[in-house]
Amino acid sequence: SKLAAGMVEHIHSSTSQSLSNTLWALSILGWYDSGVYDALLVALLNRSDQLAPQQCSNAMYSCAVASHGGSAVDKLAQVISKQDVSKRGGWIEQALANALYAWAVLGCIGIASDSLDMMAQHLLHEVNDRGPAAFISTGMTQLYLAHLEAERVGLQGGGLSTANGMLQAAAERHIQNQAKLQKIVKYSGGSAGAQQAFAALQEAGYEVKLGGRVGQDEYQVEMLVRHKLFPRGIAVGILSGSDLLRHPPGQLSGKIRLRLAQIWQRCDGLVVLSEAATKQPGLVVQRLEEEMNCAAAALRLTAA
């Protein structure tokens, strides 16, 4: 925090590159303070004529990781919307994918605006123009998540194109990546917390599977509890250290919030446990039963 505060003190002498790098570093370290992020963004925007594509993309991505919104983020989106995002303009594929992923993260946690949507439309148009061949080695999974968000909010112009195979290629890469994650869980047995929660639920008599996949696009979950009342299952997720910000402690990162939102949409219920909670078998079972009661109530309301 002292380093960040010192950066703010010397903000007027900082370059756009150092400001963007600082935002990126703070987000990777899991450190967030709304005042510091706003100060860095405002200083960055004051240098909008100097902003390189990677700096814009990194700043937007950093805000998404920290779940940071507000007028400065909207203004950054406006700057991006006015840029030439073609290859000629210096926007590489990873920068496009990162900025669109950031838009998806912000949208799923309720940080939305016309400015952010206009940015997404601008970037998606360029992505579709380049086509799947340009993104073979980078960014496909991020683009797929951006497409899902575009569908959810009914973004004008839509998401990824089916005409040139962009959506099909991104969806295929997503499914491949989810299969890899499932194999990792299968062969490793999952994290220590997942193993403890699995044992607790099995001991309580529940049918539970490590490394299940849900939805037509086969989203990977750490555990899936099967029950006759819930055909899509109840997912169980275990938070790791990287899912939480270091400051303020206990706050979920934007990335895990998007992942949990995607899982929740594909299941009948979702239980999220900390590593500490998995060490208490009774609490694990209690949390599952609470979620099952909520899911059952929702089903009754739907039936009515």
Image: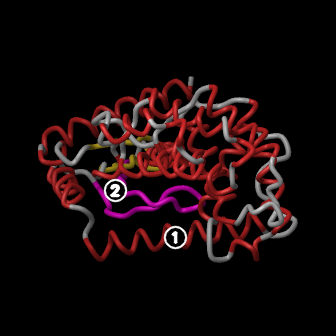
Q: Amino acid at mark 2?
A: Met
The quadrant of the image that shows the N terminus is top left
Q: Position of residue 132 (x, y in %)?
A: 76, 72
Left or right position of 225 against 71: left
Badge 1 density bin: few <14, some 14–19, many ≥20, Cα 10 Å: some
Which residue occupies 79% across, 56% down?
A: 85
Which residue occupies 52% across, 31% down?
A: 39
Q: Amino acid at mark 1?
A: Asn
In the picture shown, does residue 114 fall above or below 127?
above
In the picture shown, does residue 64 fall above or below 160?
above
* Residue 231 appears in the rendering: no
Left or right position of 117 against 60: right
Pointer 1 with pointer 2, Cβ within 8 A: no
Q: Nearer the viewer, residue 226 or 10?
A: 10
| Residue under pointer 2 | 223
Helix, strand or loop: magenta stretch:
strand
Question: What is the magenta range?
Answer: 207-227
Check if residue 216 falls in the magenta segment: yes
Which residue occupies 76% across, 77% down?
A: 133
Badge 2 density bin: few <14, some 14–19, many ≥20, Cα 10 Å: many
Left or right position of 68 against 248: right
| Residue under pointer 1 | 177
Q: Name the quadrant containing residue 151.
A: top right
* Residue 245 appears in the rendering: yes
In the picture shown, does residue 239 fall above or below 106?
below
Q: How is the image coloured?
A: secondary structure
Q: Nearer the viewer, residue 58 or 231?
A: 58
